[in-house]
Image: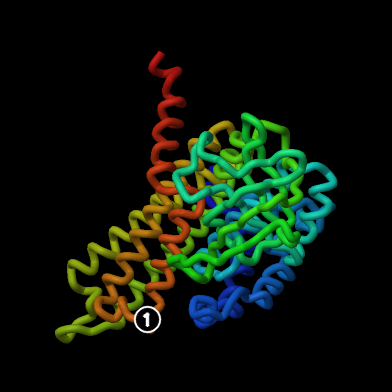
């Protein structure tokens, strides 16, 4: 039984690692962090490599490959903590349009996203815990009104998938953000390499994505699929943070010894390895469910999300501890991973929300056994 990516998928992953190692150094990440703005040159390079269109059909300008290839590349974006809207544009917006869009919507937007000519985002939150009853942004007669915040990459996106109230139900709607009826405001965030914004709609022209009233169910499906892909970003970041801690422990000398020889450091690194390895196992389970369309996807996605979120935050935090006082300084790269770990922990909803989903889905799966 195969529990890893096959040879072709691993080659695809290695190609992504080589490209990102050459083109997305931590110096480039720092440039974005320190106010350099969105790196469109890097984004265009990623598009030319075909990474944005991996899971987009060939007839819409993509490579027409599968989710396993996308998972493999997502891990490399996580290792590089790439300052790019991969999550918003590829895992969420493109996936929503591909899954729920009309042929006209797909032919208009998917080729642009695959080519890097358009950036997508998902606008769901309204500043409080999101529930089926909390949505206030309204869609009626082809117009959208209200405010969504925070919206990941909303400051640079060209198109948004918006969860809106339509009558007494919820729908997903597609909005071109270049029109006059849309106002943006950048928001402060723990990880400025992936910006946040508020989007205010004042009679903005919009069109439904999917069927009327299916918005909440389609939104949950979209989150489950994205959770698996983000899990691979998180384990990529966790593995890199572990490697950084290990390398520093072998280089740093104290009392005439490598600090890696001290039991406390050994235990810390061992704990990081265990959490990252457990997360990888759960992410692979999610990748299988996603790639096969298995009924277990909701449960597998929640498991991967919880495990990978915990692992990345654990490894990023302990990497700082291994580095000691130096780890807290601006000059070290440790905080780049800590920032990204916390940003991704909230990107698809909070960890407690996903833990609640996991408990409910596990309980539902066990109901036939209890009966």
At a point 79% along the width and 49% down the height, the residue shown is 106
Using residue 368 as the reference point, say whether residue 73 is left or right of it.
right
Q: Residue furthest left?
A: 255
- Locate residue 142: give its quadrant: top right
Q: Residue furthest front?
A: 202
Q: Which residue is mark 1?
A: 330
Residue 301 location in percent, x, y?
51, 42
Along the viewing direction, whichever of 151 and 317 lies nearer the viewer: 151
Q: Residue furthest bottom?
A: 256
At a point 61% along the width and 61% down the height, the residue shown is 154
Tell me if I can see residue 272 in this picture.
Answer: yes
- Locate residue 183: give its quadrant: bottom right
Neighbourhood count class around disc 1 (C-alpha, 10 Å): few under 14, some 14–19, many 20 upward: few
Q: Residue furthest top?
A: 371
Tell me if I can see residue 80 in this picture.
Answer: no
Using residue 140 as the reference point, say whether residue 22 is left or right of it.
left
Q: Quadrant of the N terminus?
A: top right
Q: Is 185 rendered above or below residue 361?
A: below
At a point 71% along the width and 72% down the height, the residue shown is 44
Q: Is 204 rendered above or below residue 31?
A: above
Secondary structure found at label 1 = loop
Residue 84 location in percent, x, y?
59, 68
Q: Quadrant of the C terminus?
A: top left
At a point 61% along the width and 48% down the height, the residue shown is 146
Q: Is 146 rendered above or below residue 48?
A: above
Report the colour scheme.
rainbow
Residue 99 location in percent, x, y?
71, 42
Using residue 238 as the reference point, say whether residue 198 is left or right of it.
right
């Amino acid at each position: 039984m195969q529990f890893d990516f096959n040879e072709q998928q691993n080659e695809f992953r290695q190609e992504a690692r080589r490209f990102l190692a050459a083109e997305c150094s931590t110096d480039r990440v720092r440039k974005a962090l320190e106010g350099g703005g969105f790196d469109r040159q890097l984004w265009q390079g990623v598009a030319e490599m075909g990474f944005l269109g991996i899971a987009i059909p060939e007839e819409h300008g993509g490579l027409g490959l599968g989710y396993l290839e996308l998972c493999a590349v997502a891990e490399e974006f996580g290792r590089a903590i790439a300052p790019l809207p991969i999550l918003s544009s590829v895992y969420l917006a493109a996936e929503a349009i591909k899954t729920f869009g009309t042929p006209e919507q797909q032919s208009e937007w998917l080729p642009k996203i695959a080519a890097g000519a358009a950036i997508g985002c998902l606008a769901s939150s309204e500043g409080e815990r999101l529930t089926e009853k909390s949505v206030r942004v309204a869609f009626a007669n082809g117009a959208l009104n209200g405010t969504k915040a925070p919206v990941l990459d909303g400051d640079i996106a060209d198109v948004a998938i918006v969860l809106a109230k339509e009558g007494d139900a919820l729908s997903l709607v597609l909005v071109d953000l270049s029109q006059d009826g849309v106002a943006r405001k950048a928001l402060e965030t723990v990880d400025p390499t992936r910006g946040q914004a508020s989007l205010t709609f004042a009679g903005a022209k919009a069109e439904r994505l999917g069927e009327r009233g299916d918005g909440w169910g389609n939104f949950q499906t979209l989150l489950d699929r994205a959770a698996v892909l983000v899990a691979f970003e998180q384990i990529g970041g966790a593995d890199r943070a572990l490697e950084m801690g290990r390398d520093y422990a072998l280089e740093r000398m104290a009392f005439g010894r490598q600090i890696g020889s001290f039991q406390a450091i050994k235990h810390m690194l061992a704990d990081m390895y265990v959490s990252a390895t457990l997360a990888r196992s759960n992410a692979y389970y999610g990748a299988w469910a996603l790639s096969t369309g298995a009924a277990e996807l909701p449960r597998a996605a929640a498991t991967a999300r919880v495990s990978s979120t915990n692992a990345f935050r654990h490894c990023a935090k302990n990497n700082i501890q291994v580095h000691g006082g130096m780890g807290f300084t601006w000059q070290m790269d440790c905080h780049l991973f800590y920032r990204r770990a916390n940003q991704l922990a909230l990107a698809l909803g909070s960890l407690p929300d996903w833990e609640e989903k996991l408990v409910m889905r596990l309980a539902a799966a066990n109901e036939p056994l209890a009966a």
